[in-house]
Image: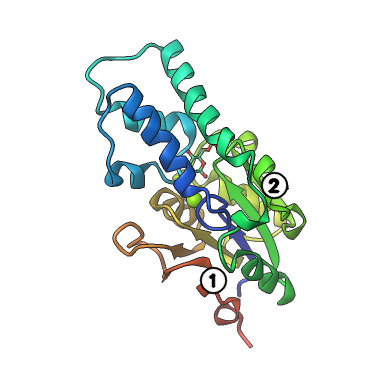
């Protein structure tokens, strides 16, 4: 039986998938690297440096370590400029209600975010107190699709992986949830999230009652 729900942040709770996408697209244009929606989809849920490596697959020259650091920082600066202005209006529709419904049903809630900006975002959105436990990229060493982040979240909740549900908008996240031995709820398009155990168009459609045995 499910006793806890572990939510991804970007693209599930916060309307930031588009902001990350736009920041990478801007960087790509500046260094003359082709960028399309398929590449944008591959970047979802992937940490900052791994995202840059995906982007640089299309590059016509190689980049030094120092150059890569500078590019990753530049992308993050573009992203941070946007989220400075964020407030509760950047919660995705139904996100707060989805998390509250889980708590209301007596289950635990956690957040598993690949982002180093997660705590800033939680503060801006005003939802930090909705989660019993938060794991972000600063707490783990292996990024999604590795299961480490979801396993750390389950451990923080004091639950076995089989008692947890993971909610994700990215293919890398669904893979991470499954490797952790959890049930995966995908939020978004079937093309990108074919592996999910349950696919929903958006977080507003999330209904915890279907996972609770009565
Ligand atoms: C994930 C996003 O949540 O965090 C990715 O889906 C992003 O797009 C990753 O690259 C890392 O985020 P940040 O804020 O540390 O660059
Ligand atoms: Mg996401």
**Within the image, what quadrant is residue 31 found in?**
top left
Instruction: Kindly identify which residue carries mark 2.
Output: 124
Q: In the picture shown, does residue 200 fall above or below 67?
A: below
Applied colour scheme: rainbow
Q: Position of residue 66 (x, y in %)?
A: 45, 11
Quarter of the image containing the C terminus?
Answer: bottom right
Q: How many marks?
A: 2
Q: Are marks 2 and 1 in contact (CB under 8 Å)?
A: no
As drawn, the label of residue 204 is 1
Q: Residue at x 24, y 28 (%)?
A: 58
Q: Position of residue 201 (x, y in %)?
A: 42, 69
Q: Residue at x 59, y 76 (%)?
A: 208
Q: Residue at x 52, y 48 (%)?
A: 16
Is residue 155 shown left or right of residue 70? right
The Cα–Cα distance between marks 2 and 1, rounded to whole angstroms, is 20 Å
Q: Residue furthest right?
A: 129
Q: Residue furthest front?
A: 85
Quarter of the image containing the N terminus?
Answer: bottom right
**Within the image, what quadrant is residue 43 found in?**
top left
Is residue 101 shown left or right of residue 197? right
**Nearer to us in this view, 61 or 185:** 61
Q: Residue at x 41, y 42 (%)?
A: 21
Q: Residues within 10 Å of mark 1 (few under 14, many from 20)?
A: some
């Amino acid at each position: 039986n499910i006793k806890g729900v572990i939510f991804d942040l970007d693209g599930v709770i916060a309307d930031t998938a588009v902001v990350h996408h736009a920041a990478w697209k801007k960087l790509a244009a500046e260094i003359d690297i082709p960028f399309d929606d398929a590449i944008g989809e591959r970047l979802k849920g992937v940490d900052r440096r791994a995202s840059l490596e995906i982007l640089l697959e299309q590059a016509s020259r190689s980049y030094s370590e120092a150059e890569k650091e500078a590019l990753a920082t530049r992308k993050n600066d573009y992203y941070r400029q946007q989220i400075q202005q964020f407030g509760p209006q950047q919660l995705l529709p139904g996100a707060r209600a989805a998390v509250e419904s889980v708590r209301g049903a007596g289950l635990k809630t956690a957040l598993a975010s690949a982002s180093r900006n997660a705590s800033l975002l939680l503060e801006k959105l005003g939802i930090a107190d909705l989660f019993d436990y938060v794991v972000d990229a600063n707490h783990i060493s292996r990024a999604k699709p590795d299961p480490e982040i979801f396993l750390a979240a389950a451990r923080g909740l004091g639950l076995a992986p089989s008692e947890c549900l993971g909610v994700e908008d990215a293919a890398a996240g669904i893979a991470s949830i499954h490797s952790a031995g959890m049930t995966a709820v995908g939020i978004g398009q079937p093309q990108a999230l074919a592996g999910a155990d349950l696919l929903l168009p958006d977080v507003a459609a999330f209904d915890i009652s279907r996972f609770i045995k009565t």
